[in-house]
Amino acid sequence: MSEYEAMHRDKTEEPGLVSLDNTNPAPAANDAPHDGPGAIHAELNEEMPPRSAPLCEDRIRDELKKVIDPELFVNIVDLGLVYEVDLVPAEDGKVDVNVVMTLTSPMCPAGPQLIGNSQAVVEAIDGVAAVNVKVVMDPPWTQDRMTDDARDQLGIF
């Protein structure tokens, strides 16, 4: 969790649990009568799947979205800096993760920080054995690689 997320996280929030309050009740699963303000139906009080869901490329990319370019304030996935994510079986049922990424420019001053943060967020995932982050400059990064969300954040239309 980034320092920003840690500062702004609701301290009463419990990860993995569904909670309801009086201001935003969830609809009953089958339109059953509501048991009163703040009532929690049994089917809604079950624990959510743990954050240690099966490892796959999408999960790794989601975690890499926590890495924010300190100059542009956009995550590296939406910027289009992550080219490849490769998972390789390792010992003890764990997985080695190889990430191929680029930087916005060869002389990007945030390069070492982006690489280190990328490695750290992937290493923190349960089931990951080793992480290798490789930086390439070919093909060079262009704005065409950015998602629409990144373009919106940067005011590029």
Image (cartoon, rainbow, N blue to C red):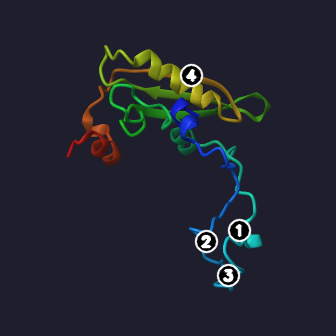
Q: Residues within 10 Å of mark 3 (few under 14, many from 20)?
A: some
Dot 3: element: loop
In the displayed structure, does residue 37 sit left or right of residue 78? right
Residue 97 at least partly seen: no
Quadrant in the picture for residue 26: bottom right
Q: CA distance from mark 3 to mark 4?
A: 52 Å
Tell which circle, 3 or 4, labels the residue nearer the N-terminal end.
3
Tell which circle, 2 or 4, labels the residue nearer the N-terminal end.
2
Q: What residue is shown with label 4?
A: 132
Quadrant in the picture for residue 79: top left
> Where is residue 131 shown, x and y percent of the image?
60, 24
Under mark 3, the amino acid is His
Under mark 1, the amino acid is Leu
Q: Nearer the viewer, residue 119 or 89?
A: 119
Answer above or below: position of 150 versus 26: above
Tell whether label 4 touches label 1 (CB within 8 Å): no
Q: Which mark is residue 44?
A: 1
Tell which circle, 2 or 3, labels the residue nearer the N-terminal end.
2
Dot 1: element: helix
Quadrant in the picture for residue 19: bottom right
Q: CA distance from mark 2 to mark 3?
A: 10 Å
Q: CA distance from mark 2 to mark 4?
A: 43 Å
Q: What residue is shown with label 2?
A: 26
Dot 4: element: strand
Q: Nearer the viewer, residue 57 or 65?
A: 65
Q: Which mark is residue 34?
A: 3
Tell which circle, 2 or 1, labels the residue nearer the N-terminal end.
2
Tell whether label 1 touches label 2 (CB within 8 Å): yes
